[in-house]
Image: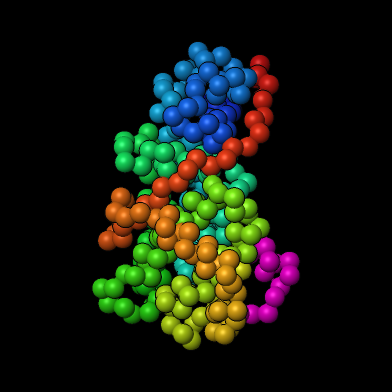
Amino acid sequence: MQARSQRTRQRLVHAGAEMFNLYGYAHATLEQIAGVAGMTKGALYFHFASKDGLAEAVQEQGRAMLREFVGEHQEAGVPPVQVLIDMTHWLARMLQDDLVIRASFRITNECTGRESPGADFHEVWISEVLRLLGQARETGALQDRGAENGPETLLSAMVCGIGVLAGTAVRFPRLSDQVPALWAPLLRALVPPGDIARYRTHPPAVAENARPPAATAETVGPPATTVETVRLSATIAKSVRAPAAVTGGVRASAVAAGSPGRATRVLTPEH
């Protein structure tokens, strides 16, 4: 019985993510969500007392997905800086492929400046960025910049900016191709020059399938930068507004129009 209840709750979370992503938090209704889940509104209320509660459950699942991704990489012994690089590629992909992550960012974007039904999803990601940077600093993997935190601020803005760009006409292959170019100057600002070649800035799938030659201090630099990359960087800079969330001395926030929705998939009711 408990397993069935958990499956029903998960269906509602997924249906909520679909509707929040399609119509936005303000315009999605519980009737729509219940219909997509294939159940009555009364059955929905058995699991969630309000739309706020369902939105919080959607964002909590997004947080769990992030924690799982980072945890698996760290358990595998991946260095913190490489985890950060892979996390930005993962984010770019998931914002195109996963409704929960897309909906979580959209809920936060729409609730900027007022009380959110859940945790600020940008702040969740920024907190993880700062935690990983702290681990990297403890192991001596970062340049010693004293009290200066410019690279950390730029990286936080980059994470939020990817979320913004995923809600525009920038599609995943194009966005994914530009992420390494965004990392090129950032990596030079973060790590000692002699350590740049240790890190892979292209997506992990490319490393596994194509196995390109190892990066060097020269190949991690300007060659990947194009006019489109400059425009992409400018879009990120304009999309990030500060201050809104303050975590570990870094202020970052992003405001974006609602992400375009995906086609709704109607699930049949569970008996």
Q: In which quarter of the image is the N terminus?
A: top right
Which range is magenta?
203-215
Q: Is 228 above or below relative to 263? A: below
Residue occupying image coordinates x 52% and y 68%: 230
In-front residue for pair 223/72 = 223
In-front residue for pair 248/112 = 112
Q: Quadrant of the C terminus?
A: top right
In-front residue for pair 133/96 = 96
Q: Is 136 above or below relative to 249? A: below
Would residue 12 appear left or right of 188 to someone viewing this image? right
- Asked whether the viewer can see residue 39, the reply is yes
Q: Is 162 above or below relative to 112? A: below
Q: Where is residue 208 in the image (x, y as percent from the top left)?
A: 70, 67
Would residue 190 appear left or right of 75 to someone viewing this image? left
211 within the magenta span: yes
What sort of colour scheme is used for the picture?
Answer: rainbow
Q: Is 267 above or below relative to 18? A: above
Q: Position of residue 47 (x, y in %)?
A: 47, 22
Residue occupying image coordinates x 64% and y 80%: 214
Residue occupying image coordinates x 46% and y 32%: 25
Q: Position of residue 136 (x, y in %)?
A: 41, 71
In-front residue for pair 153/57 = 153
207 within the magenta span: yes
Q: Which residue lies furthest to the right in this view?
A: 210
Q: Position of residue 165 (x, y in %)?
A: 52, 53
Q: In which quarter of the image is residue 243?
A: bottom left
- Asked whether the viewer can see residue 104, the reply is no
Residue occupying image coordinates x 67% and y 25%: 266
Q: How many numbered discs, if any?
A: 0
